[in-house]
Amino acid sequence: MIPRVLGVALFLTAASLSAAPGFWQAATQADFLRGEVDQLSIDQHGRLTLGPALTKVHDAAAPFVWTVMPGADGAWFLGTGNDGKVIKIDRTGQGSLFYDSTEMEVHALAPAPDGGLYVGTSPDGRIYRVDAKGQATPFFDPDDKYIWSLAVDGSGNVFAGTGDKGTVYKITPDGKGSRFFASKTSHAVTLAFDQNRQLLVGTGAPGRVFRVDAAGKGFLLLDTTYQEIHSIRVDPKGAIYAAAQSGRAQSGGDSQDAPITPPPVTPSIPNVSTEITSMTVVDVVSAQSSGGASSSTGRSTMTGAVYRVQPDGLWDELWTARDDAPYDVAIEGDGAVLVATGGKGKLFRLSGDPVSAVLVTRVPAQQATMIARSGDRTLLATANPGLLMAVASTRATRGTFESDVKDARLVSTWGAMTWRATVPAGAKVEIHTRSGNTRTPDDAWSEWSPAYSNADGSQITSPKARYLQWRAVLTGTATAVPVLTSLSSAYLPRNIRPQVTSITLHPPGVVFQKPFSSGETEIAGLDEDAQDKRAGSNNPLGAGAPVLGRRIFQRGLQTFQWKAEDDNNDELSYDVFYRREGDTNWRSLKSDQRDTLLVWDTTSVPNGTYVLKVLASDRKSNPADASLAGELESSSFEIDNIAPTVQVGTLRKDGTRFVVPAEVRDTDSAVTKVEYSLDAQRWQPAFPRDGILDGRQEGFDIRLDADAQGRTLVIRATDALGNVGTGQVVVR
């Protein structure tokens, strides 16, 4: 193993900068969707503009608003958690407590006669009938733990989707219930009626959609790859829309034990966290059943899709969300589909053929859990925190966008920022930046810069740092709407010193042919001017290393190979030096080498012990006063191009045998093998007098039988570097 001794070339200061700038650009919908919007929209063409006005109708003072239902005279009812309350909001927006259950969650509301409500609670799985004055009486109490959804048919029968056995109950108006449909899944999450008033059931673990006839016979319409169907809606033409979601997409829809993504929760069930970032029905069950000990995999694992099932049963996946979980859908008058998602509380609008998605707005919450319509307004229920928000049909007059945090990987100097925008009279687009050295912006970051004025190129004034974020503020009027279409920012990372990480010394004499050579043998690394720069996929040395051909032997040549790296991805060049043991000065062997392979003709220097040094420089990519270099010394190695000497002494007789004494000497390396042959016959090993062949000088006594008389004896000695010397004598 070659020891690594890192030398330091102090040519420049550590604050030097790489000469190759980088650029960040936001110009597509995908680019802008990575950021955070407030009252802005992002269309399918990647244009950022003012979105619909967003106002807070009511703050439920609870972590979750699970469900919304319209009441009489323009009122709305909210089902909340973790406090299990029903809140009534009158037409003026004033909220009041309508019903306070003894359970934690109100996931389901349905209209009851005389202006009352059916209220489904969890986790004890009870249904209450609450009259118009808020007085509650028990209506139905099954054995199941969760009441996820309620639906009332034209005869006043109440259908209840439950968990954790996936059962749907049918309850008559007098409160007598029976099992109506067994989904053979873990949860019956959502209920709706199709055009023919047949019940539709969306399930969880796995996510499926069933159509159930009046006799309770179910037919599977849709089998998805997601954990649950969170919502079902039917449009006026009879098409069924299903919002599917899961902590991560599953391999298939046939599994009854689909893996789940539990949310982060506080240590006990009575207080589920208000910081849940992914909340499917399966997640709620997992969090509650584990006593709140589960942990989240993070919002990046949330995914989902919106499916459309035509009246004839044909279905298609209308839209797929890679980082957003669809919670609910709503059908607009023109056939467009609104999709409420988590975990960043986004509202999308799907339209066109093929379907394209527009980010309509983002609510100030982590989940948009349900969509409701009221005249020309769209209402959104949210979770984390629990709010009721109104999305108006008119545009907001001001909106902001904060980009995702850009990582330059190294402390960088910021360059110019440019952007393209359409700004009519009366409108304005302002761009600001801030920087810091933590991945998530915090108090240790710089403040937002003043607005930059020149869209064609404004110097970024934020301090040098590793991370950068930009913010756009758009202001306008009903007739003057600004549009931001792209933004680009330049950065110059701090120049980092390159490193030579290893030096490999091949055995003496081992060289490699060039893989694309023709005619006479060409040796890779021996003549730089003739280097073949072509690279191939079968290179065992890795990217950037020269491709080597067949291994051959050439006496007197020494092959070196090294590896180097540069965090700035600068082009590197190499200077190679050598020194003999005992010398203090390095001598140049090769300058401005491009390849990481060098073959040295060692016959040009005296025998001895040597050390090689490789210096890697990024001067090809940086100004002379800003380039940096790093170096590494090899382990010591021997150069020996002189063969051992073989001196044959005076023969003597030992009985009937001959004894031939010989002395073998080598000045610079150990003798590794001695052999002898009679009259060019097979070579035979010779062993030294002391029995150990380990030195530069060895004595031998070669014993021959009587028939050796008159024959020629040749003695051959090989040293550690492959040099061969011989001696001979005629046996007499």
Image (cartoon, rainbow, N blue to C red):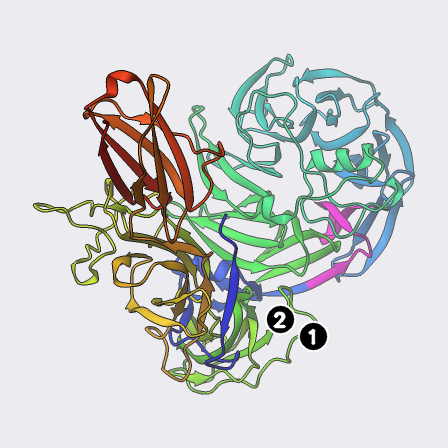
Q: Give the quarter of the image for residue 316.
A: top left
Magenta segment range? 56-82
Of 218 and 292, nearer the camera is 292
Q: Residue 71 in magenta?
A: yes
The answer for how far apart the CA atoms under marks 1 and 2 are is 8 Å
Q: Residue 98, relative to residue 52: is it above or below?
A: above
Q: Amino acid at mark 1?
A: Ala
State whether residue 71 appears in this view: no
Check contact, mark 1 vs mark 2: CB within 8 A.
yes
Q: How far across and how far down the image is residue 629, in percent?
A: 43, 72
Q: Tell me the residue at 19%/54% (across/down).
A: 532
* Lateral position of residue 7 relative to residue 344, left or right: left
Residue 376 in percent (x, y) is at 57, 58
Residue 328 position within the rendered picture, expressed as x and y whole percent measured from the top left: 60, 43
Q: Residue at x 56, y 81 (%)?
A: 462
Helix, strand, or loop for circle 2?
A: loop
Which of 68 and 339 lies nearest the eye of the viewer? 339
Residues 23 and 19: in front is 19
Residue 622 appears anywhere in the view:
yes
Residue 437: mark: 2
**Identity of the residue drawn at 71% across and 74% down:** 443
The disc, 1 or 2, on the residue closer to the chain's N-terminal end is 2
Main SS of the magenta segment?
strand
Under mark 2, the amino acid is Asn
